[in-house]
Image (tube, rainbow, N blue to C red):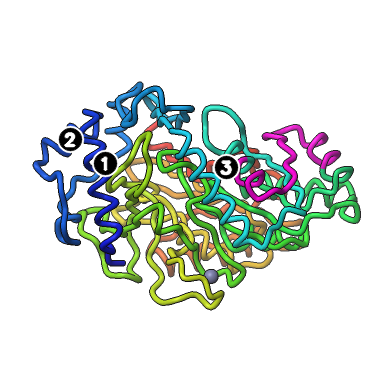
Amino acid sequence: MRISEKQIQQVNNRIQALVQSNSFYGEKLKASGITQIISQEDFEKLPFSEKSDLRDAYPLGLMTAPEEEIVRIHSSSGTTGKPVIIPYTAKDVDDWAIMFKRCYEMAGMTCEDRVQVTPGYGLWTAGIGFQNGAEKLGAMVIPMGPGNTDKQLEMMTTLHSTVLCSTSSYALLLAEEIQKRGIKDQICLKKGIIGSERWGEKMRRSISEELSIELYDIYGLTEIYGPGIGISCEKDCGIHYWDDYIYLEIIDPITGKTVPDGQMGEVVITTLVKEGAPLIRYRTHDLSRIIPGECECGSKFPRIDVIMGRTDDMMKIKGVNVFPSQIEEVLTSFPELSSEYQIRISHLEGKDTMRIYVETNGTVDFLDLSKRVAEKIKSKIGFTPLVKVVEIGLLPRSEKKTKRVIDERYE
Ligand code: ZN
């Protein structure tokens, strides 16, 4: 996707703001010697930014607007080391809500909807983003936050929530709970806005069928406003993103070169109008591709594919590069398996082993099923994993992100 004249102008404005404020990234741009661009080629010479850079700027080194204009901060918790602090101006907060409202409209929501928000509130961008966007739309927000399934279901049934905002794992947990309690006839949900983690086709089908709702994938990350910079549409073929707020590139994660449209690689995002903490060429480590051409839904906003995983999810096992999404694709082709799985990699007696735990109900022969799954995975990745079949419900479900790959080689 070529950068437009207007976007080049917007990037130049952001570069000027960064340089003038002496912010962390402004210093980096000065050091690189590029403080103005006139073409795509110039743009592609700008240095990338990384989560580790943002950590080095802790606490407020990213602040690019004067402090009196900063109205809020958010923070993304790193699994290791210092968190990243992102300052927002009033305009940034409003822009984010406008983008989020656009997401809701793309999903066909209106001011008549009642929106149950289950992602967390606090330092991270989840809950409050879903809320501000829904309020901008004029819908009624039920700001639950995560957890307390009894209370969630009570509010859902008595207030007749029509939209569920959730992670995929929590949506699945709620769907299973609703079925278990036999209260589906009291549920008025029509849509689910699902964010924050990659989820397979099978999980999507389970949630959608058990709750009888349409599902939309929402995309975003705390460093770039938060969730709401893009969403899937009713045609369900990729995620439209708002190119008047962000410029998005796909690069080869190894070489750093941009790849042609349609080709898979790492998503890199530049914010075009952000004031509190503009980011230039921020490496998300999310894997996706630009979908060429216009969408059947009629929207002119460009699309990326649903996120296929993380560049750092790549596992090197027995010298072979394996992505969890490859395993998941195979598991999806077995209707007798549930949507849950767990991959454990360990190093035993001098060699790598991969064990895959999957779930099924008691009606099938576990041994035969494990053999068939192992064979199909071998045909996909080149070596045979150990497949263990367990009773449905035994694998962990969580309200936040479910950890599906456990690499015991480095523990
Ligand atoms: Zn579309």
Vertical arrangement, residue 93 with respect to residue 72, above or below? below
Q: Amino acid at mark 2?
A: Lys
Residue closest to the far left: 33
Task: State the image quarter where residue 102 is shown.
Answer: bottom right
- Locate the N terminus by quadrant: bottom left
Marker count (numbered): 3
Are discs 1 and 2 less than 8 Å apart at CB? yes
Task: Report the span colored magenta.
Answer: 132-155
Q: CA distance from mark 3 to mark 2?
A: 36 Å
Instruction: For label 2, count other residues whose C-alpha is less than 10 Å away and answer few (under 14), some (14-19) or many (20+).
Output: some
* Residue 17 circle label: none
The residue mark sitting in front, 1 or 3, is: 1
Q: Amino acid at mark 1?
A: Ser
Instruction: For label 1, count other residues whose C-alpha is less than 10 Å away and answer few (under 14), some (14-19) or many (20+).
Output: some
Q: Secondary structure at mark 2?
A: helix
Vertical arrangement, residue 82 with respect to residue 131, above or below? above
* Residue 49 circle label: 1
Which residue matches tag 2?
A: 28
Q: Residue at x 61, y 53 (%)?
A: 358
Task: State the image quarter where residue 63 is shown.
Answer: top left
Q: Residue at x 26, y 65 (%)?
A: 259
Q: Secondary structure at mark 3?
A: loop
Which residue matches tag 3?
A: 402
- Locate the C terminus by quadrant: top left
The residue mark sitting in front, 1 or 2, is: 2
Instruction: Indicate if the residue with disc 1 has its beta carbon within 8 Å of ligand 1.
Output: no
